Amino acid sequence: MRQQPGDRHPGGVPVTAAGETPAVRETASFPGRVKGKVRAWTAGFATTLTEPQAVLLTGKTVRFRAAQTLLWSVIAGLFFVQVVYGLYDAVLQVAWWPGHSLKAAWDTNGFGLVHSGNWPLYRHLSFRDTAGPALATMGIVTVTAKRKYWDVPVSTLRMVTAPLVIIVLTFALGTLGVYLVFFGLPDAWHHLLGSRTVPGTRWLGYLSAGQILIGVVTAKILHRYWAPVGAALQGSFLDWQVDRWQAKAVRAGMSAGQAAARGMIPAVERLPLAPPAARERLAQMWRDNTGLRRRRTRKLAAAGAVTLLVLLALLALLGAVGHYAAGHGIAVPYLFPKG
């Protein structure tokens, strides 16, 4: 029997004119809200790992998608951290010409702009050690771009300015984070709680907990701004791959579908040589591609992509040498002669 307005649900809740019981808004406690946010974040992360799979050009789906996504995220993170370290060393530490180096001016007082005894703490932590993990997260977002960002339009102006904006904000947030972790928060603790300590937290110092916290917070803030840009960059690279291989098919007198059926497709579609999301997106772009760009445009795109990859690889190599060799006192001829 349909309930009438004014009647009450057995639980005591009044019935509306539509005969429905309105939802009861629960007032959660603070711990409850925190648990809710944690559950939402966990659900979002799980969705990222297990989002619906697309069929590859081989006619198969990616096996062990979640494990591959995690593995590629770790690889990309380690790689882009070294790229950031390498860029820092290339500009501010290495003397590319004898007698011409920015290292002394930078290490002493930030090119004369900083006059503080704490500059030795800021110069590496703010602009290298915390910027590395934060910017590496942007690299992970780029190579593992989520499906929801694939079709988000990004203007050319944003594509050009976004890297600069991200770098400036990373340095600013890194500097603020170093101040809070090493000065602001300890001073507030001393003012409010005196000499009290929290038992069992000494081990956090050995894990560089402050540096990790700054990097995580910075990356979280910048992630949403960069995600559409990263997806657009990934799409540009994949578009070059699609045009390159479909041009081969045209020269062989085959359509894109025939080329895929005969295995004339990029190696990343046949083998796990790229993150699952990138392989699935390439397959979608292959099927949706309606025409090839002019040959001259394809050559320019290929030259730009190869140049970028080589540059990133060289910076990563330089960063690894500076971090793991020179950073531990090992002299490297020409690059880091004094260790």
Image: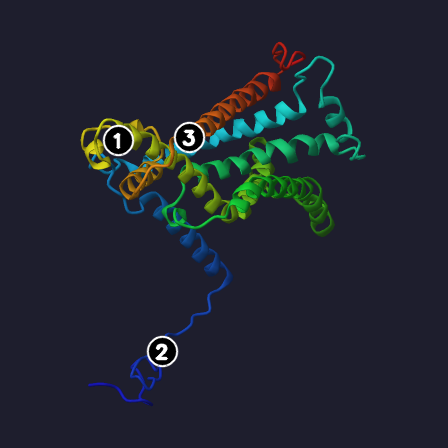
Secondary structure state at the residue bearing disc 3: helix
Q: Nearer the viewer, residue 337 or 190?
A: 337
Sequence-first disc among 2 and 1: 2
- Whether residue 187 is visible to the viewer of this picture, yes or no, is yes
Q: Position of residue 21 (x, y in %)?
A: 32, 79
Q: Residues within 10 Å of mark 3 (few under 14, many from 20)?
A: few
Residue 176 position by quadrant: top right
- Which amino acid is tagged 1? Val
x 59%, y 20%: residue: 322
Q: Nearer the viewer, residue 166 or 180?
A: 166
Secondary structure state at the residue bearing disc 2: loop
- Which amino acid is tagged 3? Arg
Q: Which mark is residue 22?
A: 2
Q: Residues within 10 Å of mark 1 (few under 14, many from 20)?
A: few
Q: Which mark is residue 296?
A: 3
Sequence-first disc among 3 and 1: 1
Q: Is residue 293 left or right of residue 63?
A: right
Vertical arrangement, residue 4 with respect to residue 304, above or below: below
Q: Quadrant of the N terminus?
A: bottom left
Q: Quadrant of the C terminus?
A: top right
Q: Nearer the viewer, residue 176 or 270?
A: 270
Q: Position of residue 243 (x, y in %)?
A: 34, 34
Q: Position of residue 175 (x, y in %)?
A: 67, 40
Q: Which mark is residue 250?
A: 1
Distance CA(mark 3)–CA(mark 1): 16 Å
Q: Is residue 145 left or right of residue 64?
A: right
Q: Nearer the viewer, residue 57 or 128?
A: 57
Sequence-first disc among 3 and 2: 2
x 56%, y 23%: residue: 319
- Whether residue 270 is visible to the viewer of this picture, yes or no, is no
